[in-house]
Image: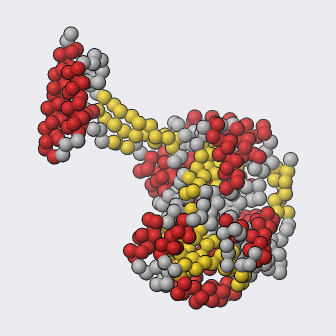
Amino acid sequence: MVFPVINPVTGATLYQQRAATPEDCRAAMASARAAAAALREVPLAVRLDALQAVLGWLQRRREWLLDQIVAESGRCRGDAMLSDLFQLTEDLHWLHDNAARVLADEAVPTPITLLGKRSRIFHEPRGVAVVISPWNLPLAIGMTAAMFALVAGNAVVLKPSEHTPMSAVFDEVRALHPLLLQTLQVVQGGGDLGSRLIAERPDLVVFTGSLATGQKILAQTAPLLVPVIMELGAKDAMLVFDDADLPRAVAAACWGNLHNSGQSCTAVERLYVQRGVYDRFLAALIESSERITTGTGAEADLGGITTDFQMRRIEEQVEEARQQGATVHYGGRRSECGRFYLPTLVSGVTDDMRLAREETFGPVLALYRFSEESEAVALHNASPYGLSSSVWTTDRLRGERLARALETGCVNLNNVMLTEGNAGLPFGGVKLSGFGRMKGAEGLLGMTRSKAVLEDTSRGKPEPNWYPYSGEKLALMGELLDALGEKGLRRWWRLARAGLAIERLVRRLARR
């Protein structure tokens, strides 16, 4: 079976993609399991060599990659450069430079009661990771997850979105290095393939996508006890206080909502502006929106909407809000060529509207007024989502308070969507926006299992906690516990006294 891959802006068929069969899924998982077993003997240096091959390829094939991304997603070239190529390149450079440090065995202090023993943590690969990636960043999201998993020592089965298969791109990736050909399997097709791959019981599922699909994946993985990392929907907020740098905040709101045509999980969808500057802010934002150009070329600001169903969702949310009394200050419709949705500013949005409750994933910004800091926090935290937020204020103490008070996975102070730009920071959300983290040390360790190791070099010596028990031993154990609660020199004196007494008792009992 084949399915057409369509350029969403022109409507032209780019190519026919063969869809994987159930047998293909089973074969891919079997190959990945064999590769995972072999990877245990492959040094990190070799895995990093494969990573370096990808980095070199990203540089050599930049213009061709931009062509592929724009053709399959309909986004403008600038968005493809920033979100896919720039982000992926920086993520992989961080991974290359930090993997050895993060994955190294850890020495852990051993308590005084276990004197003479050595404690460590090994960070071992999980095995086979299934990566299910979305259509909005068809290269960066899937490849970042896949390379973090592979460098951690896992084999990967990657299922790209059927809307942006990027078939030729992933074929080139696998051919870059023998290790990639062995350890990275790519399965193309619809959402049903994700379910088939999970049914083969991988060791980890990494999913980026909608809340509804995430819930289905959880329902399937729960009985199998397969761990998951999920980055789901969002309704990201921007809070602007009256002491903010307003021209900069307006520019950030415009870009933060429209970047990638709003088809970004961290796009600003809720804009809360303090009452004293609300009218000025809205007027300036309308002016900025009027200057936005649409298209897919290098000079365009706003690209197309990638899928038909996403365009319908945007239109339905805006039209419902309009019919229920919301005010559309700008936009609220498609452009004349059809596949571009104009920058849209809406006020008067109430909680019963889908535009308030659901992720829009398009160039639509809902504006709200607030009076006090506490009100802004309450409005922000009332959302069931929590992925990324931004706070705009020149009061550093207020910024620090809000960074701690907001229920979200990422906070940007006087910037927008920028936590993603630092590959050393963990990326992920709270509440309905998912759990687990990608990127940074936490994201890399999430691709591993921790193994606790304790080594004892004692010879011919019984442990005090071993048999036989006695009333005297129990009393001395109590003294040892009491000593642990002491402070300073008295603590060490009591520990030494109790420890020596237990040692003498153990030797005496062993001679019986």
Q: Position of residue 382 (x, y in %)?
A: 57, 65
**What is the basis of the colouring in this image?**
secondary structure
Q: Going 77% across and 59% down the picture, which residue do you hit?
A: 163
Q: Quadrant of residue 330?
A: bottom right
Of residues 499 and 354, the one nearer the viewer is: 354
In which quadrant will I find the C terminus?
top left
Q: Is residue 148 above or below residue 292?
A: above
Say if residue 267 shows up in the picture. yes
Q: Position of residue 179 (x, y in %)?
A: 60, 45
Q: Position of residue 158 (x, y in %)?
A: 67, 49
Q: Going 56% across and 48% down the picture, which residue do you hit?
A: 149
Q: Is residue 377 above or below residue 501?
A: below
Q: Quadrant of residue 237?
A: bottom right
Q: Going 64% across and 37% down the picture, which residue do you hit?
A: 223
Q: Is residue 85 above or below residue 299?
A: above
Count of labels in the image: 0
The answer to whether 335 appears left or right of 213 in the picture is right
Of residues 147 and 242, the one nearer the viewer is: 242
Say if residue 259 shows up in the picture. no
Q: Position of residue 78 (x, y in %)?
A: 65, 74
Of residues 64 and 286, the one nearer the viewer is: 286
Q: Going 72% across and 81% down the picture, which residue do you hit?
A: 328
The answer to whether 280 appears left or right of 460 in the picture is right
Q: Residue furthest top?
A: 512
